[in-house]
Amino acid sequence: MNKKYKISFNINLEVITSILLIISTILALIISNSSYRDFYNNLFYNTYLVDGFSLHSFVNNFLMSIFFLLAGLEIKEEILYGSLSSFKKASFPVVASLGGVIMPAVIFTYFNLNTEYMNGVYIPISTDIAFSMGIYFLFSKYLKPSLKMFLLSLAVVDDLVSMVLIGTMFSNKLNLYFLTLTLLTLAIMCISNKILKIERVSFYLLCGIFLWYFIHLSGIHSTLSGILLAITIPTKSYKKRYSTSYYIRKNFNIINNLIIIPLFAFANTGINITSNLDLTKYPTVFLGIYLGLLIGKPLGIMLFTYLSNLIGFTKKPSDLNWTSIFLVSLICSIGFTMSIFVSEVAFYPNMELIELSRICILVTSFTSMIISSLFIKTFKELHII
């Protein structure tokens, strides 16, 4: 009974998160196109928690580090014990993910090669785990259970690539002093895990705060601290019933899903549509993002999986058909929070370009959700997805 309740709660949490994301986005758009626009902008951009660190920076740099910590722990669990724990298990979703990263990047590059907008190449390669899993759970009664693991594995690998690129490609000039302190902190946590076998959640979270601070000052993008912290946290129990990773995910998942992710959407989708923003000013950026996500994602996933299966490099899971895999490729074109996050980093401080990217991502993501939902409704009667 408890297990059944837990599964039901997890499903509801994913659905609730997706609904909150939509509500947060709509609310931000309404406020930004009303008389409260200045209040919204002042709240996030002119409210400083400490000198030079606004509320917007707190959401995008600190709270999103928690998001990446939980994503990192999920990736680590999958690599060690789950759907990515062996070459046979991992090869098919990994190849699918590579296609879903490479093809959107190729399309964006086609439109923006030799322009000043090439930093945006990382925007259409991302998949929004929360929204994609939300779509699955909304229609789960029509879909095969094995589809969930393939979708999750693909999205997890996809976001791992995105997170590594964010942390490395968008770093400022390195400060060797703080970089040394970062490496020292990582070494302490690794020793604490593997040799001293420390399992206290509070210990790793305290070290994580220092790690975030040192990385932030080192010039590396601070959200990478979430991934690095996840690497050092124990995923198996030495003395307790459950691992440190389990307790962190259990205690922070609700905060992440119900507060951090919707708050990020609210803080980053406040676009003033009635402003003088000229959508034709950056046509190559708009086309690169729009076609990269909407066409590049499905095309790359299908092309790479089909060819790798054809030559025998990977093997399509027997309980999945190509219609199911195509559905996953459509769902993965929902970039949303991850793509918005990358656009903030890639085009900073050009706010006009950031706003245009946000509009494009919103349009593309909602288009993808509609297409995915219509696809499911069309094929559910045939029981082939």
Image (tube, rainbow, N blue to C red):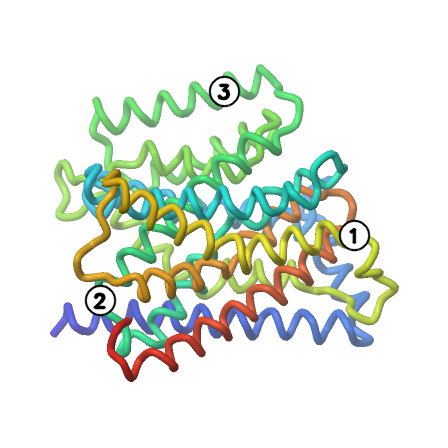
Q: Could you tell me the amino acid type at mark 2?
A: Pro
Question: Looking at the image, is mark 3 or mark 2 earlier in the sequence?
Answer: 2
**The image quarter in which residue 230 lies:** top left
Between circles 3 and 2, the one closer to the viewer is 2
Q: Label 2's element?
A: helix
Amino acid on which disc 3 is placed: Leu
Q: Is residue 7 visible?
A: yes
Cα separation, mark 2 vs mark 1, equals 42 Å
Image quarter where the N terminus lies is: bottom left
Work out whether residue 70 can be spotted: no
Q: Position of residue 22 (x, y in %)?
A: 54, 72
- For image coordinates 72% across by 52% down, the residue present is 354
Residue depicted at 29% across the width and 56% down the height: 150
> For residue 282, which numbered disc appears in the image?
1
Give the labeled residue for mark 3: 181
Give left or right: position of 232 versus 125. Answer: left
Disc 2 designates what residue?
145
Instruction: Give the image location of residue 336, x and y in percent.
Output: 55, 59
Residue 249: horizontal and vertical position, in percent? 32, 52
> Of the residues shown, which amino acid type is indicated by label 1?
Tyr
For label 1, the crowd category at 10 Å Cα-Cα, with few meaning under 14, some 14 to 19 and many 20 or more, is some
Q: Nearer the viewer, residue 212 or 350?
A: 350
Q: Rounded to the nearest whole Å, what is the CA distance between mark 3 and mark 1? A: 41 Å
Helix, strand, or loop for circle 3?
helix
Q: Nearer the viewer, mark 3 or mark 1?
A: 1
Q: Are marks 3 and 1 in contact (CB under 8 Å)?
A: no
Residue at position x 35%, y 43% in the image: 95
Residue 158 numbered mark, or none: none
- Badges 2 and 1: C-beta atoms under 8 Å apart? no
Give how far apart the Cα atoms at labels 3 and 2 are.
Answer: 45 Å
Q: Which sits earlier in the primary sequence, circle 3 or circle 1?
A: 3
